[in-house]
Image: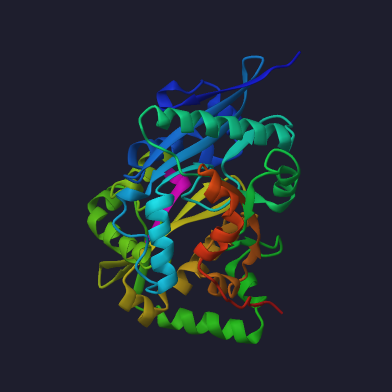
């Protein structure tokens, strides 16, 4: 009789030798990326690595992250309103110790992978048991986990979880994941631009004209290390102006990423008069191109339409390298839709370890999420 078991690891050195064979289809679960987290995770984050076994053979891997929100100076400085104040107060006092089954730093179903067919009920049960074990681990250290969240599932998988393992949990949908399915007939960037309607072709030309004078070049590891302070300053500007943050990257994060993942991690710098004024990053994940963090000088961004040009440049790279899709993640939904990305709804499941709060979570949670109104753009003929 087959027996499914799991083991939770706290360091990469403990992982089974076959880990990367199982995680082969997802770069965000391979040890090269996990080492990035281990060596340069946000200061308020602790990672756990989960191995799932069948008859002692590794068949699945998963990631969990503990976040201590008390260590954050700010949750984000863009929105200054009463609702934001209330949300921050609630998180500080009733949700400051959070456990995520999945990767809270990126968007997408990147929390687990199996190398054989597994039903969603079994996966949900394993994730729930792991959450309980990690919660107990912290309880022994006198740390009470307030919130447990299972994050980012595509709708078909979420529907199965809703019917089985997570039927008692509150299901939530935040901003959608903006995904750009690249058409196979696009062989060059010119093919892509030719598919635009006149309005969006004009937008492309206008953005292209604006960025004149800006030089772009891919940065090597030495370049990243040399410019680490400036890169972090540009990243911080964007991160702090986000509506809500649960972490801030460590200063050495990008250099560590380049060191561990080599040519699979790409940082492109934007230079004005030989001074770095912006950057974007990408991770090559099989046939999927994953956009990662970026940064820019706000004044230059406005003058040169830097952000829009970054989106065009990432798309150009994806087309020329023949990726099937680009994951643009959450935030800036409207401008991402203007270059061709479409919203894909993702679900998470969440509970609070205080039974009274958990009972009313369906009333509380929607009030904590900033209301977002946006218009989807349709740029193609």
Asked which quadrant contains residue 54, the reply is top right
Quadrant where the N terminus is found in the figure: top right
Residue at the spot 62% in from the left edge and 67% down from the top edge: 341
> Which image quarter is the C terminus in?
bottom right
The one of 329 and 21 positioned closer to us in this rendering: 329
Among the 4 quarters of the image, the one containing residue 175: bottom right
Residue drawn at (66%, 61%), measured in percent from left and top?
182
Of 271 and 188, the residue lying toward us: 271
**Location of residue 311 with respect to 133 vertically, above or below:** below
Q: Which residues are magenta?
A: 262-269
Q: Based on the picture, tell me whether residue 86 belongs to the magenta stretch.
A: no
Q: Is residue 261 above or below residue 280?
A: above
| Image x and y of residue 270, in percent | 35, 67
Q: Is 81 left, or right, of 177 in this rendering?
A: left
The spot of residue 374 in percent (x, y) is 58, 76
Magenta span has 264?
yes
Q: Nearer the viewer, residue 86 or 179?
A: 86
Q: Main secondary structure of the magenta part?
A: strand
The chosen color scheme is: rainbow
Using residue 158 as the reference point, say whether residue 133 is left or right of it.
left
Q: Residue at the front extreme?
A: 356
> Residue visible at 74% across and 32% down?
117
Image coordinates for residue 97, horizontal then vertical, percent: 41, 44
Residue 151 in view of the camera: no
Q: Is residue 334 above or below residue 231?
A: below
Residue 234 in sight: yes
Q: Residue at x 26, y 53 (%)?
A: 228
Counting from the top left corner in percent of width and height, residue 154 is at 67, 51
Give the mark count. Answer: 0
152 and 203: which is toward the camera? 152
């Amino acid at each position: 009789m087959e027996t499914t078991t799991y083991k939770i690891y706290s360091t990469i050195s403990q992982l089974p030798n076959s880990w990367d064979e199982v995680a082969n289809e997802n770069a965000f679960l391979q040890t090269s990326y996990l080492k990035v987290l281990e060596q340069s995770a946000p200061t308020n984050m602790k990672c756990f690595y989960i191995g799932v076994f069948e008859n002692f053979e590794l068949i699945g891997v998963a990631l969990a992250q503990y976040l201590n929100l008390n260590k954050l100076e700010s949750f984000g400085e863009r929105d200054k309103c009463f609702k934001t104040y209330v949300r921050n107060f609630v998180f500080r006092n009733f949700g400051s110790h959070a456990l995520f089954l999945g990767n809270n730093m990126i968007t997408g179903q990147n929390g687990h992978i199996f190398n054989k067919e597994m039903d969603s009920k079994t996966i949900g049960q394993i994730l729930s048991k792991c959450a309980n074990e990690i919660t107990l681990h912290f309880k022994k250290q006198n740390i009470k986990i307030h919130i447990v969240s299972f994050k980012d599932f595509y709708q078909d998988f979420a529907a199965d979880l809703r019917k089985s393992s997570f039927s008692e949990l509150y299901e939530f949908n935040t901003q959608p994941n903006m995904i750009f399915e690249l058409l196979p007939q696009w062989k060059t960037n010119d093919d892509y631009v030719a598919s635009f309607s006149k309005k969006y072709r004009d937008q492309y030309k206008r953005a292209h004209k604006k960025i004149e004078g800006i030089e772009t070049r891919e940065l090597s590891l030495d370049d990243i290390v040399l410019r680490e302070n400036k890169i972090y300053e540009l990243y911080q500007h964007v991160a702090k102006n986000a509506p809500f943050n649960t972490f801030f990257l460590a200063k050495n994060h990008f250099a560590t990423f380049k060191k561990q993942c080599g040519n699979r991690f790409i940082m492109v710098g934007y230079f004005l008069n030989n001074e770095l004024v912006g950057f974007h990053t990408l991770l090559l994940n099989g046939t999927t191109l994953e956009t990662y963090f970026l940064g820019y000088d706000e004044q230059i961004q406005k003058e040169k339409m830097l952000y829009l040009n970054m989106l065009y440049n990432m798309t150009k790279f994806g087309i020329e390298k023949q990726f099937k899709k680009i994951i643009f993640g959450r935030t800036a939904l409207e401008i991402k839709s203007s270059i061709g990305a479409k919203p894909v709804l993702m679900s998470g499941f969440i509970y609070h370890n205080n039974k009274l709060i958990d009972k009313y979570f369906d009333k509380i949670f929607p009030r904590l999420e900033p209301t977002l109104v946006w218009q989807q753009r349709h740029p193609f003929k």
